[in-house]
Image (cartoon, rainbow, N blue to C red):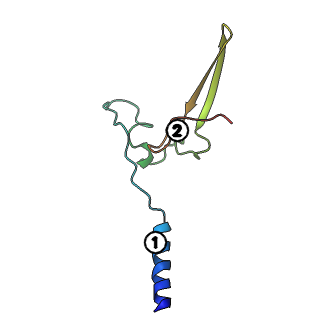
Amino acid sequence: MKNISWAVLLIFFISSCSEKTKERIPLVTAPFSTIDTLAINDWWNRDDNPIVNLKVNRDSVVVFGLYTVSNNTLKLSAQFYPLYPEETLRYAWR
């Protein structure tokens, strides 16, 4: 009886540790129909594009950065690949 309870506990532990992928839903759906749709709505469900690969490693989402200096003020700007809905819109420069 003791072995059965350990087996049930082990099965419960393993099943609770398995990561379930949840369905990604776009935060906002673009209302436009005649635009380039590479990076809007549910772009992650589409086939790969021969022009540009939008499905990059998540540690490489910054495409490029720009900076300007005007009147002793430094202005920084960064362009990102499209982010998944669960990803944060903040980025820390390293």
Secondary structure of the residue carrying tag 1 is helix
Count of number-bearing discs: 2
Name the residue: 49% across, 73% down. 13
Quarter of the figure with the N terminus = bottom left
Residue placed farthest to the top in the image? 71
Q: Is residue 66 left or right of residue 18?
A: right
* Residue nearest the observer in this picture, 81 or 53: 81
* Residue nearest the observer in this picture, 22 or 2: 2
Specify the label residue 51 is tagged with: 2
Q: Looking at the picture, how far across and down is residue 23, in whole percent?
A: 39, 53
Hey, which quadrant is residue 27 in on the image?
top left
Name the residue: 44% across, 58% down. 21
Identify the amino acid type marked 1.
Ser
* Residue nearest the observer in this picture, 90 or 43: 90
Residue 36 against residue 70 in the figure, above or below: below
Q: CA distance from mark 2 to mark 1?
A: 41 Å
Q: Looking at the picture, how far across and down is residue 57, in whole percent?
A: 59, 47
Q: Indicate which disc, 2 or 1, sits on the residue closer to the N terminus.
A: 1
Name the residue: 52% across, 38% down. 51
Question: Few, some or many C-alpha atoms within 10 Å of disc 2 (few <14, some 14-19, many ≥20)?
Answer: few
Specify the label residue 74 is tagged with: none
Identify the amino acid type marked 2.
Ile
Residue 77 against residue 29 in the figure, above or below: above
Q: Mark 2 against mark 1, which lies toward the viewer?
A: 1
Residue at the spot of label 1:
15
Name the residue: 58% across, 39% down. 61
Secondary structure of the residue carrying tag 2 is loop
Question: Few, some or many C-alpha atoms within 10 Å of disc 1 (few <14, some 14-19, many ≥20)?
Answer: few
Residue 58 against residue 79 in the figure, above or below: below
Hey, which quadrant is residue 72 in on the image?
top right
Q: Looking at the picture, how far across and down is residue 37, in whole percent?
A: 40, 36
